[in-house]
Amino acid sequence: MNTIVQVRPRRRPARRAALAALLALAAAPAAASAEPGPVMTEPLPQRLAAISCLGDPATSVATPVLLVHGTGVTSQENWPSNHQPVLLRRGHAVCTVTMPGFGYVDVQRSAEYVATAIREVHRRAGGRRLSIVGQSQGAFQPVFALRIWPDLAAMVDDLVGLVGAYDRGSTAITAECARPEGCVPAFHQIATGSELLTALARRALPPGPSYTAIGTLADATVTPQPAANEQRGMTSVQIQDLCPGRRMPTGQDHILMAGDAAAFALTTDALGHPGPAVVARADRSACGKLFFDGVDLAAFALVAPAILTRSGTPTREIPPLRCFLRPDCADLDGRGRVLTGATARRARDRVTVTLAAQAPGEIRVLAGTRRVVRRVAPGTRRLTLTVGRAVTRLRIDARPDGYVPWVRERTLRLTSGRPS
């Protein structure tokens, strides 16, 4: 007869405690925002409805591309006659996003649409990185968004700007806003020396993507060139670096940049190689033509009158800076949270704190008279501190990079042997 002996598994308190800590961290209350960075105020259905894709970002042969239009147009006016069909034929899935009000509105509103589009295209691509090509304000907006929402940079391979207005703004736009009737809100914000550009310039472009700014010395909208095309962290090139003396015979060099053959040669050089565009590597045969192969000139001509005659409603009122652009911002929704979760496990006088961070910044743990400050990056981090037996609670303050005030994000109750 066989005798069945029941063997009790050995207890592994340390492993069980660690597992409990991780489970508790996963179950910790979610922050007010499900995504890193400032909470968005534009309705999510409207932001998602502004996105359109041709091709499947998850299966396209080449990197998915997000196109961002300029001021005074829609995505359907800016791209279908030029970049959209040509990039599609080259194996890219091509997505577009349309900013509200032809881009004339507060650029802080429009930035939410661009940031949402980056996240959504990245999601549709199954986590593949995407590339971004933007014209005019469409070049400025991704550069803006990547400095505000800390998760975006890891989603982007290349960012290529065509005739963009960056931190230096535009003196031509400044002159337009000096008229008695003023100018549209977006122009107030990208005029040289504006409060918004001054605040934005305090933030460096995040590492990760390859950044290329493509300008033209003949630009009469973003001025002066080449200085206005220079942005800290971006490689700045002019189409005249590839094709000396180049300009459009119509004088509309800024608007026609979407179809310019030299600009497209530099763009595709950036998209097709690691790093930013390299003039010496770009296709110089583009210098022999005004528009790149595949541009639908008839369609381009049809939208030109609307682009040249449309204008927004001028105003003297300048949109106020939102909290996320002010270093003194202390509003958790306005600037975004550092932590998504935290647990504390006590073993006598030693406390192990496990932190889940979604944004880079600093955390400050206060326990009785103890105060510990540490830098954190997105991910999980543990720290251990010694506290007195009388201490029953921990307070965790945090501040994301770029902000001065500490704000309480978590309060944890200390219990022996198990996470709080």
Image (cartoon, grey):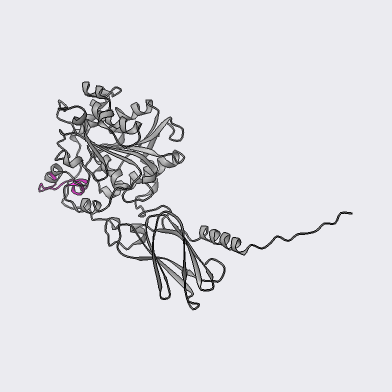
Return the residue found at the far right. Answer: 1
Task: Point out residue 364 in the picture as x, y percentages from the top left corner.
Answer: 39, 66
**Is residue 177 one of those drawn in magenta?**
yes
Residue at x 14%, y 40% (from the top left corner) = 224
Q: Which residues are magenta?
A: 176-191
Task: Point out residue 95 in the picture as x, y percentages from the top left corner.
Answer: 37, 35
**Quarter of the rendering containing residue 37:** bottom left
**Residue 54 seen anywhere in this rendered image of the structure:** no
Q: Is residue 128 left or right of residue 17?
A: left
**Residue 178 seen anywhere in this rendered image of the structure:** yes
**Quarter of the rendering containing residue 408:** bottom left
Task: Point out residue 101 in the picture as x, y percentages from the top left corner.
Answer: 27, 43
Q: Nearer the viewer, residue 61 or 137?
A: 61
**Is residue 405 one of those drawn in magenta?**
no
Q: Nearer the viewer, residue 298 or 198?
A: 198
Q: Is residue 143 left or right of residue 119?
A: left
Q: Is residue 1 above or below residue 116?
A: below
Which quadrant is home to the N terminus?
bottom right
**Quarter of the rendering containing residue 252:** top left
Return the residue found at the far bottom. Answer: 390
Residue at x 56%, y 61% (from the top left corner) = 18
Q: Is residue 17 above or below residue 238?
A: below
Question: How many numbered dots are placed on residues in this image?
Answer: 0
Residue at x 21%, y 28% (from the top left corner) = 242
Task: Point out residue 90 in the picture as x, y percentages from the top left corner.
Answer: 37, 26
Q: Nearer the viewer, residue 326 or 155?
A: 155
Residue at x 38%, y 38% (from the top left corner) = 130
Q: Is residue 31 above or below residue 122?
A: below
